[in-house]
Amino acid sequence: MWDALSQWGILISLARAWRREKNAKLPRGNWWLPWLGESLDFFWRSPDDFYKTRFSRYGSIFLSHIFGSTTIVTSTPEEAKFILGTRHKLFRARYPTSIDRVLNHPFWEGDFHCRVRKIVQAPMMPEVLKSQISKFDSLATWTLNTWSHGDHVITHAETRKFSFHVALYLVCSLEPSAESMKMLDDYECVAKGAICFPLNVPGTGFHLALKKSKVILEALDNIIARRRMERSVHNDILSSLLNSSDENGIKLTTDQVKNVLITLLFAGHETTGVLLVWIVKYLTENPQVLHLVKEEQEIVRQSMADDKQPLAWANVRNMPYTLKVVQETLRLANVAPFSPREILEDVEYNGILFPKGWRVQVYYRHFHLNPEYYKEPLKFDPSRFEVPPKPMVYTPFGNGIRLCPGSELVKLEVLIFIHRLVTNYSWHAVGADKGIQYWPTPRPKGGYKIKVHSHAHSSFSQEQL
Ligand code: HEM
């Protein structure tokens, strides 16, 4: 009923828009189908097939009805610049209902967004991150030290454990514990139900995700309460949030702080954990690249006075080839393949009408895999980053006012993890390639199982945690 009304609302706004913008036209595509629209096709085939079919049928921009909304999918860097940059005020960040609800409305808006962004960004600037290297290194070692020679390991389970604890430390100075591992398990259910049909009845993934999201919010409540009672000073995002006040001296409420924390911990570990799985997979499948990475990391290891010491900033700066591996993986794997927006006013761009109330997706994956910008785009070739990519055609961290504040942190933690991994272990993949699991972030299905072999020398002591 509501859906039918909203379809009528859209038709009315469309008719108005047509009257005003006589020369602009809508992109081609299938958007008439009510309610489910093309969502079944989107979820049951694969998003890759879905997009590919439509780009070849309609060109670089098309119209669809997915995630419960009429959506324009754009795929050129020029459109990305227009939507995320120059005219960003005409578009509002808006995730599908399922993720919006399980993460308690993750997109911060207006003044609240500006205020929180400043707080969140500060500890993720390179000059501040420098002082955290030994901590991140100890977390990489803590993760890898549980691997024994000959073990079978599900890579994703390990990499998300690492990335979650890095985020947890940065956000609220918490060390690994039973409490943190429980929260990580709860986040797994949240992630599973984050992109799905939002049917809140027992037995659905969405229902479980909502339940677990509540559990996480309760745990965050306890963390905040403990922090308020403590006298010691912490230099982390939670303290900055609790101490910040606006120009009128008004502090953030506990609900606002919880809202920031639940999103930040999710954003801070989900994509990075998956990025690391792709890196391990691409290195396994490209032995010549792995060889160059090992060579570079061995030089770093030997340059350190003592194998048991944590890495320092100078060591991490000495990993240019490995950094290209990270950049190339971000391009090819596209762990955050699009940015979703809602159109706030009728807008015309390049003769195309973007009607108010509809959604738009800036689909980065299409230009990251476009032969016009990247020669042999499906080939894993870190050396392509010897020449910096043209502006706007490389945007794994988005663009504009919502550019990912965690991009420097990601590079740093991933380089540290790779160093400890390749200097302490060799591995090979176990079992056949099972393809890609697309939601909530594209990753190798099954988490990429490997068998590990440890090297003779060991990394620095876990007691330093
Ligand atoms: C491989 C790792 C990561 C990738 C590929 C990634 C990608 C992105 C992208 C594409 C956006 C823009 C979303 C949009 O425009 O709608 C974004 C936003 C964001 N990311 Fe990341 N991210 C990663 C890791 C992280 C980490 C480690 C953190 C924090 C610890 C983080 C925190 C955020 C936050 C808070 C936003 C929202 C910013 C805002 O609304 O102003 N991300 N990320």
Image (spheres, helix red, strand yellow):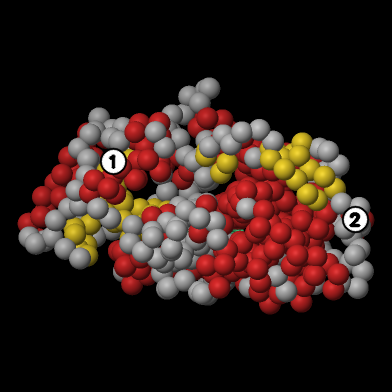
Q: Earlier in the sequence, mark 1 or mark 2?
A: 1
Give the labeled residue for mark 1: 65
Image x and y of residue 105, in percent: 48, 49
Question: What residue sits 29% from the left and 49% below the top?
Answer: 55
Which residue in the rendered view is the most extreme toward the front?
288
Q: Label 2 belongs to which residue?
A: 458
Does mark 1's beta carbon lie closer than 8 Å to ligand 1?
no
Q: Residues within 10 Å of mark 2 (few under 14, many from 20)?
A: some
Q: Secondary structure at mark 1?
A: strand
**Residue type highlighted by circle 2:** Ser
Residue lying at 83% horizontally and 54% vertically, measured from the top left: 424
Residue at figure coordinates x 52%, y 46% from the top left? 441
Whole-angstrom CA distance, mark 1 to mark 2, is: 54 Å
Q: Is residue 431 found left or right of 421 in the rendered image?
A: left
Residue 160 at x, y percent in the picture: 67, 47
- Give the residue at x 46% y 45%: 100
Mark in the foreground, 1 or 2: 2
SS at mark 2 in the image: loop
The foreground one among 142 and 278 is 278
Q: Is residue 332 left or right of residue 237?
A: left
Q: Quadrant of the C terminus?
A: bottom right
**Residue 225 visible in the displayed image:** no
Measured as percent of width and height from the top left, residue 163 is found at 68, 53
For the N terminus, the image quarter is top left
Position in image of residue 186 (x %, y %): 65, 38
Along the line of sight, which residue is nearer the eye, 21 or 113?
21
Q: Quadrant of residue 346?
A: bottom left
Three-letter amino acid code at disc 1? His
Q: Is residue 443 left or right of residue 130?
A: left
Q: Residues within 10 Å of mark 1 (few under 14, many from 20)?
A: many
Mark yes or no: residue 141 visible.
yes
